Amino acid sequence: MPNESARILILGGTVEARLLAGRLESDARFSPVTSLAGVTAKPSKIAGEVRTGGFGGAEGLADYLREDDIALMVDATHPFAAQISANAAKASTRTEVPCLWLERAPWEHQAGDDWKLVVDIEEAARVIPAGARALVTIGRQEVGPFFARENIHVVARMIEPPNEAVPVQAEVLRARPPFTLEQEKTLMQERNISVLVTKNSGGDATYAKVEAARELGLPVVMIARPGKPPLDTASSVDEMLSLIERTLG
């Protein structure tokens, strides 16, 4: 490990990214820089240096790694942030700056779950039966295919408002996780929800909706994670800290 603190770029936006930044900031050997895409207006507080906004693709990210003397990069973005992960892997190859992947484990099917597994947003929107009342919890950027379904009622929950107009057969609930099991069950019952739509994000912060659907006997349209580049991977902050130490020597 070098004597001066190693600058570590964290591609963030997740709970794990924030926890990792806090752990690295408390260690004199490291100097974390967390990069946020800027899609959330009021992100939670993050320890250490924070930058907001894109890099300009893989080449722009590579330039940043060189110019800011980054020793190592951690991709701790959302499991569905496939493009930034691809850019990170390319930038790592071009600069020889190591890139590690911090990704929480996906949710696993449990006894009592009724999951319809789909590969993407478009398929998720297609498989919802006509007349359904769908609780859609995929964020604001990909709700278009659900809003386009005129024969279902959509309750779309998100942190920030959508960029597009909300049709008459839909409503938007703005809320920030985590949510409790009782909160999720109450929401589903009050809105008379008949199907839940979610990405397989993993983690604890939003798992209560899956538990609520299980207890209420509701089907879940579960969107599978996209493929990402093969990188050295950790599923927890503790594992990532050990991996960082081994990688930097």
Image (cartoon, rainbow, N blue to C red):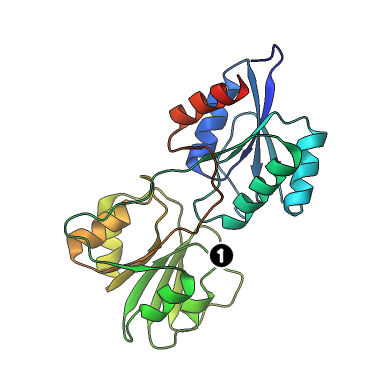
Where residue 73 sits in the image (x, y, percent)? 64, 36
Residue 178, above or below 199: above
User: Could you tell me residue 192's position as x and y percent?
Assistant: 27, 73
Q: Quadrant of the C terminus?
A: top right
* Placement of the N terminus among the 4 image quadrants: top right
Q: Quadrant of residue 24?
A: top right
- Residue at 25% x, 53% y is 182
- Image quadrant assignment for residue 101: top right
Left or right of 131 in this view: 163 = right
What percent of the width, then of the height, locates residue 53? 71, 50
Question: What residue is disc 1 on?
Answer: 161
The residue located at (25%, 55%) in the rendering is 211
Q: Residues within 10 Å of mark 1 (few under 14, many from 20)?
A: some
Report the number of numbered marks: 1
- Which percent across, then down, holds residue 91? 71, 45
In the depicted structure, whether residue 3 falls above or below residue 228 = above
Say above or below: 142 vs 150.
above
Residue at (53, 31) in percent of width and height: 20
Given residues 246 and 74, the one toward you in this image is 246
Mark 1 element type: loop
In this rendering, the answer to whether 52 lies above or below 65 is below
**Camera-nearest residue between 214 and 114:** 114
Q: Amino acid at mark 1?
A: Pro
Residue at (54% x, 53% y) in the render: 228
Task: Tell which residue pokes out farthest to the top in this image.
Answer: 3
Task: Decide which of 110, 187 is in the foreground and name it.
Answer: 110
Asked whether residue 174 is in view, the answer is yes
Is residue 55 visible in the rendered image? The answer is no
Side of 3 where 221 appears, left or right: left
